[in-house]
Image: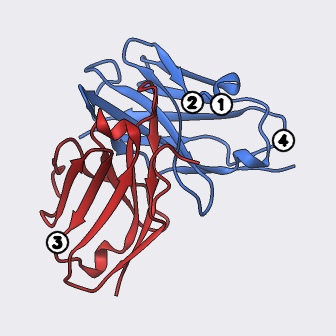
Chain colours: A red, B blue
Amino acid sequence: SSELTQDPAVSVALGQTVRITCQGDSLRSYYASWYQQKPGQAPVLVIYGKNNRPSGIPDRFSGSSSGNTASLTITGAQAEDEADYYCNSRDSSGNHPVFGGGTKLTVL
Amino acid sequence: QVQLQESGPGLVKPSQTLSLTCTVSGGSISSGSYYWSWIRQPAGKGLEWIGRIYTSGSTNYNPSLKSRVTISVDTSKNQFSLKLSSVTAADTAVYYCARRVVRGVTNWFDPWGQGTLVTVSS
Protein backbone atom coordinates (compact mmCIF):
# COMPACT_ATOMS: atom_id res chain seq x y z
CA SER A 1 0.00 0.00 0.00
CA SER A 2 1.09 3.55 -0.73
CA GLU A 3 2.27 5.99 1.94
CA LEU A 4 -0.10 8.48 0.33
CA THR A 5 -3.79 7.57 0.51
CA GLN A 6 -6.40 8.69 -2.01
CA ASP A 7 -10.06 7.79 -2.40
CA PRO A 8 -10.31 5.36 -5.33
CA ALA A 9 -13.21 7.16 -6.98
CA VAL A 10 -15.03 10.48 -6.80
CA SER A 11 -17.86 11.88 -8.89
CA VAL A 12 -19.06 15.42 -9.54
CA ALA A 13 -21.91 16.95 -11.48
CA LEU A 14 -20.97 19.03 -14.48
CA GLY A 15 -20.15 22.58 -13.42
CA GLN A 16 -19.95 21.77 -9.73
CA THR A 17 -16.95 21.82 -7.42
CA VAL A 18 -15.04 18.72 -6.39
CA ARG A 19 -12.20 18.15 -3.95
CA ILE A 20 -9.79 15.25 -4.30
CA THR A 21 -7.73 14.50 -1.21
CA CYS A 22 -4.41 12.87 -0.45
CA GLN A 23 -3.36 11.84 3.05
CA GLY A 24 0.05 10.98 4.39
CA ASP A 25 2.43 11.83 7.19
CA SER A 26 5.01 13.30 4.82
CA LEU A 27 2.49 15.96 3.80
CA ARG A 28 3.06 17.64 7.15
CA SER A 29 6.56 18.48 5.91
CA TYR A 30 6.37 18.51 2.11
CA TYR A 31 3.93 19.89 -0.44
CA ALA A 32 2.15 17.55 -2.81
CA SER A 33 2.09 17.78 -6.56
CA TRP A 34 -0.91 16.61 -8.59
CA TYR A 35 -1.16 14.87 -11.97
CA GLN A 36 -4.03 14.31 -14.34
CA GLN A 37 -3.98 11.16 -16.44
CA LYS A 38 -6.44 10.39 -19.19
CA PRO A 39 -6.74 6.89 -20.69
CA GLY A 40 -3.78 5.94 -22.83
CA GLN A 41 -1.91 9.14 -22.03
CA ALA A 42 1.01 10.11 -19.84
CA PRO A 43 0.34 11.97 -16.59
CA VAL A 44 0.25 15.75 -16.80
CA LEU A 45 1.27 18.05 -13.95
CA VAL A 46 -1.66 20.24 -12.86
CA ILE A 47 -0.62 21.60 -9.44
CA TYR A 48 2.68 21.84 -7.57
CA GLY A 49 3.92 23.53 -4.44
CA LYS A 50 1.64 25.61 -2.27
CA ASN A 51 -0.76 26.27 -5.16
CA ASN A 52 1.05 26.66 -8.47
CA ARG A 53 -0.34 25.85 -11.89
CA PRO A 54 1.91 25.14 -14.87
CA SER A 55 1.32 27.15 -17.98
CA GLY A 56 -1.74 25.94 -19.84
CA ILE A 57 -3.56 24.48 -16.83
CA PRO A 58 -6.97 26.15 -16.34
CA ASP A 59 -7.45 28.25 -13.24
CA ARG A 60 -10.36 26.07 -12.14
CA PHE A 61 -7.64 23.76 -10.74
CA SER A 62 -6.27 24.74 -7.33
CA GLY A 63 -4.36 23.11 -4.51
CA SER A 64 -4.29 23.41 -0.74
CA SER A 65 -2.85 21.66 2.25
CA SER A 66 -3.67 21.24 5.93
CA GLY A 67 -1.92 18.96 8.37
CA ASN A 68 -1.41 15.57 6.77
CA THR A 69 -3.88 16.20 3.94
CA ALA A 70 -3.34 17.78 0.55
CA SER A 71 -6.29 18.65 -1.66
CA LEU A 72 -6.87 19.28 -5.33
CA THR A 73 -9.99 21.31 -6.02
CA ILE A 74 -11.69 21.68 -9.37
CA THR A 75 -14.12 24.60 -9.34
CA GLY A 76 -16.70 24.21 -12.07
CA ALA A 77 -15.75 20.75 -13.30
CA GLN A 78 -15.87 20.19 -17.05
CA ALA A 79 -16.41 17.00 -18.99
CA GLU A 80 -12.78 17.05 -20.08
CA ASP A 81 -11.68 16.89 -16.44
CA GLU A 82 -12.81 13.27 -16.22
CA ALA A 83 -9.58 11.42 -15.58
CA ASP A 84 -7.41 9.72 -12.98
CA TYR A 85 -5.67 12.05 -10.56
CA TYR A 86 -2.51 11.18 -8.66
CA CYS A 87 -0.81 13.01 -5.82
CA ASN A 88 2.94 12.84 -5.29
CA SER A 89 5.20 13.78 -2.43
CA ARG A 90 7.90 12.01 -0.46
CA ASP A 91 7.89 8.84 1.58
CA SER A 92 8.06 8.93 5.37
CA SER A 93 11.88 8.98 5.28
CA GLY A 94 11.81 12.01 3.00
CA ASN A 95 14.34 10.33 0.75
CA HIS A 96 12.19 9.00 -2.06
CA PRO A 97 9.24 10.28 -4.04
CA VAL A 98 6.00 8.35 -3.74
CA PHE A 99 2.62 8.49 -5.48
CA GLY A 100 -0.84 8.07 -4.09
CA GLY A 101 -2.94 5.24 -5.42
CA GLY A 102 -4.94 7.56 -7.64
CA THR A 103 -8.51 8.84 -7.74
CA LYS A 104 -10.80 8.21 -10.69
CA LEU A 105 -12.91 11.33 -11.26
CA THR A 106 -16.22 10.92 -13.03
CA VAL A 107 -18.04 14.01 -14.29
CA LEU A 108 -21.77 13.34 -14.38
CA GLN B 1 10.68 23.43 -24.22
CA VAL B 2 12.15 20.22 -22.88
CA GLN B 3 10.68 16.99 -24.25
CA LEU B 4 11.39 13.39 -23.28
CA GLN B 5 11.02 10.24 -25.38
CA GLU B 6 11.40 6.65 -24.23
CA SER B 7 12.74 3.92 -26.47
CA GLY B 8 13.60 0.26 -26.17
CA PRO B 9 12.30 -3.28 -26.70
CA GLY B 10 8.62 -3.81 -26.08
CA LEU B 11 9.06 -7.48 -25.22
CA VAL B 12 11.52 -8.98 -22.75
CA LYS B 13 11.83 -12.61 -21.71
CA PRO B 14 11.55 -13.61 -18.06
CA SER B 15 14.85 -13.55 -16.14
CA GLN B 16 16.41 -11.23 -18.70
CA THR B 17 17.28 -7.54 -18.37
CA LEU B 18 14.92 -4.78 -19.41
CA SER B 19 16.74 -1.86 -21.02
CA LEU B 20 15.18 1.49 -21.88
CA THR B 21 16.56 4.84 -22.96
CA CYS B 22 15.09 8.30 -22.52
CA THR B 23 16.18 10.96 -24.99
CA VAL B 24 15.96 14.55 -23.84
CA SER B 25 15.41 17.26 -26.43
CA GLY B 26 15.01 21.02 -26.15
CA GLY B 27 17.58 21.35 -23.38
CA SER B 28 20.78 19.87 -22.01
CA ILE B 29 20.54 16.98 -19.56
CA SER B 30 23.62 18.39 -17.85
CA SER B 31 22.29 21.85 -17.15
CA GLY B 32 20.20 22.91 -14.20
CA SER B 33 19.52 20.91 -11.06
CA TYR B 34 17.20 18.14 -12.10
CA TYR B 35 16.49 14.56 -11.18
CA TRP B 36 16.02 12.48 -14.32
CA SER B 37 13.59 9.78 -13.30
CA TRP B 38 11.94 6.54 -14.30
CA ILE B 39 8.36 5.71 -13.30
CA ARG B 40 6.23 2.74 -14.26
CA GLN B 41 2.56 1.87 -14.32
CA PRO B 42 1.15 -1.67 -14.65
CA ALA B 43 -2.06 -1.86 -16.63
CA GLY B 44 -4.99 -0.56 -14.59
CA LYS B 45 -2.79 0.32 -11.63
CA GLY B 46 -1.06 3.33 -10.14
CA LEU B 47 2.29 4.99 -10.63
CA GLU B 48 5.47 3.61 -9.09
CA TRP B 49 8.70 5.58 -8.91
CA ILE B 50 11.65 3.41 -9.95
CA GLY B 51 14.61 5.69 -9.46
CA ARG B 52 16.54 8.70 -10.68
CA ILE B 53 19.88 10.08 -11.66
CA TYR B 54 20.83 13.61 -10.69
CA THR B 55 22.53 16.12 -12.95
CA SER B 56 25.75 15.35 -11.06
CA GLY B 57 25.41 11.63 -11.83
CA SER B 58 24.34 10.45 -8.39
CA THR B 59 21.58 7.87 -8.28
CA ASN B 60 18.76 6.92 -5.93
CA TYR B 61 16.44 3.97 -6.29
CA ASN B 62 13.14 2.71 -4.95
CA PRO B 63 14.12 0.40 -2.07
CA SER B 64 11.75 -2.29 -3.37
CA LEU B 65 13.62 -2.43 -6.70
CA LYS B 66 17.09 -1.31 -5.69
CA SER B 67 18.77 -4.70 -6.06
CA ARG B 68 17.70 -4.95 -9.72
CA VAL B 69 17.88 -1.37 -10.99
CA THR B 70 20.64 0.64 -12.62
CA ILE B 71 20.15 4.12 -14.03
CA SER B 72 22.92 5.78 -16.01
CA VAL B 73 23.40 8.88 -18.12
CA ASP B 74 25.12 9.60 -21.43
CA THR B 75 25.56 13.35 -21.58
CA SER B 76 27.08 13.21 -25.07
CA LYS B 77 23.80 11.82 -26.40
CA ASN B 78 21.56 13.76 -23.98
CA GLN B 79 20.10 10.48 -22.79
CA PHE B 80 19.60 8.55 -19.60
CA SER B 81 18.89 4.86 -19.34
CA LEU B 82 17.21 2.25 -17.18
CA LYS B 83 18.26 -1.34 -16.69
CA LEU B 84 16.07 -3.70 -14.67
CA SER B 85 17.47 -7.18 -14.24
CA SER B 86 15.85 -10.55 -13.57
CA VAL B 87 12.47 -9.43 -14.82
CA THR B 88 9.24 -11.33 -14.22
CA ALA B 89 5.68 -10.87 -15.43
CA ALA B 90 5.18 -8.45 -12.51
CA ASP B 91 7.50 -6.02 -14.29
CA THR B 92 5.11 -5.72 -17.24
CA ALA B 93 4.10 -2.07 -17.32
CA VAL B 94 4.17 1.20 -19.17
CA TYR B 95 7.50 2.82 -18.37
CA TYR B 96 7.78 6.60 -18.27
CA CYS B 97 10.75 8.87 -18.02
CA ALA B 98 10.25 12.25 -16.41
CA ARG B 99 12.18 15.21 -15.09
CA ARG B 100 11.82 15.81 -11.38
CA VAL B 101 12.33 19.25 -9.91
CA VAL B 102 13.03 19.77 -6.22
CA ARG B 103 12.78 23.21 -4.63
CA GLY B 104 12.96 22.94 -0.88
CA VAL B 105 9.77 21.30 0.39
CA THR B 106 8.27 21.29 -3.09
CA ASN B 107 8.89 18.69 -5.79
CA TRP B 108 7.22 17.80 -9.04
CA PHE B 109 7.61 15.73 -12.20
CA ASP B 110 7.43 17.70 -15.43
CA PRO B 111 7.66 17.01 -18.29
CA TRP B 112 6.93 13.32 -18.86
CA GLY B 113 7.67 11.13 -21.84
CA GLN B 114 4.76 9.53 -23.65
CA GLY B 115 5.54 6.16 -22.08
CA THR B 116 6.50 2.82 -23.57
CA LEU B 117 4.86 -0.52 -22.88
CA VAL B 118 7.20 -3.31 -21.87
CA THR B 119 5.79 -6.82 -21.69
CA VAL B 120 7.65 -9.62 -19.95
CA SER B 121 6.77 -12.89 -21.60
CA SER B 122 8.45 -15.92 -23.09
Per the image, label 2 sits on a secondary structure element best described as loop
On what subunit does the disc labeled 1 rest? B
Q: Is residue A63 above or below residue B68?
A: below
Task: Using the rendered view, name the quadrant where residue A107 is placed.
Answer: bottom left
Q: Amino acid at mark 4?
A: Pro
Label disc, if present, on residue B42 of the rendered structure: none
- Most distant residue in the front direction: A67
Q: Position of residue A9 (x, y in %)?
A: 45, 71
Left or right: A37 as drawn, with respect to B84: left
Q: Residues within 10 Å of mark 2 (few under 14, many from 20)?
A: some
- Residue drawn at (51%, 36%) of the image: B38
Determine whether label 1 and label 4 are within 8 Å by CB: no
Residue A94 seen by the camera = yes
On what subunit does the disc labeled 4 rest? B
Q: Position of residue A73 (x, y in %)?
A: 22, 64
Q: CA distance from mark 1 to mark 4?
A: 16 Å
Location of mark 1 (residue): B65
Determine whether label 1 and label 2 are within 8 Å by CB: yes
Location of mark 3 (residue): A75
Q: Amino acid at mark 1?
A: Leu
Q: Position of residue A40 (x, y in %)?
A: 49, 65
- Residue drawn at (65%, 32%) of the image: B64
Q: Nearer the viewer, mark 3 or mark 1?
A: 3
